[in-house]
Amino acid sequence: WYQRRVRAGVPWIDGYYKLTTLNMCFFKVSGTSVRAVSHEPRLEFSFPTASWTVGDFGEPDEEIKSGTGKTAFNVKMSMFDGAWNPLGVISDDGMTITVKDLVGKVAQLEWKSEKDVQRLREAFDPAEAPPSHYKVQPEVVGRLVFLSGAPGLGKSTAGQL
């Protein structure tokens, strides 16, 4: 059901990985080189190339150890130009890597097939004209609230209140 593309000395599979707690992009992996790729095909962005390194990087905390059954971190990542440098545990099949995400929550980088990536890309609304249930009324002046901040700080929660 998938073509295993494992490189010598690298225990993960080349291809796309999706972080379970991050919806803005996929990570395209080729050997130890990694690149963030937008979900929205028309909105390509350019993050610096990242890298993953194989090795023994110490004992994981209990949460990761109990979830994976592994006793050592075996991948070190340098992502988003060094802004995020998680240690991870690679599954035996090379299709899942357990890490702590950008806000310290346990998450998985899950391998996705080309069909999965295409299906996820097609499920997103177009960025240039997202659908809305609101009636277009250009003559009515409205209000604009701009919320900004780092991931996980509650912008979406505040917007829903």
Image: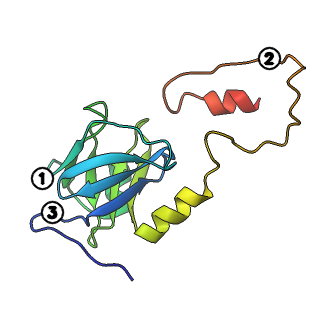
Q: CA distance from mark 3 to mark 2?
A: 52 Å
Classify mark 1: helix, strand or loop.
loop
Residue marked by disc 2: 143
The residue drawn where x is 10% and y is 68% is: 8
Q: Residue 90 location in percent, x, y?
A: 26, 61
| Label 2 crowd (10 A; few <14 / some 14-19 / many >=20) | few
Q: Are marks 3 and 2 in contact (CB under 8 Å)?
A: no
Decide if residue 160 is on the left or right side of residue 20.
right
Say whether disc 1 or disc 3 marks the residue closer to the N-terminus: 3
Q: CA distance from mark 1 to mark 3?
A: 13 Å
Q: CA distance from mark 1 to mark 2?
A: 53 Å
Which quarter of the figure has residue 96? bottom left
Q: Residue 145 location in percent, x, y?
A: 71, 18
Disc number lying in front (1 or 2): 2
Residue 60 visible, this orientation: no
Residue marked by disc 1: 56
- In this orientation, which residue lies closer to the viewer: 128 or 77? 128
Classify mark 2: helix, strand or loop.
loop
The residue drawn where x is 61% and y is 58% is: 123
Q: Amino acid at mark 3?
A: Val
Residue marked by disc 3: 10
Image quarter (top left, top right, bottom left or bottom right) of the C terminus: top right
Q: Residue 72 location in percent, x, y?
A: 20, 55
Q: Amino acid at mark 1?
A: Asp
Give the vertical position of 97 relative to 92 (above or below): above
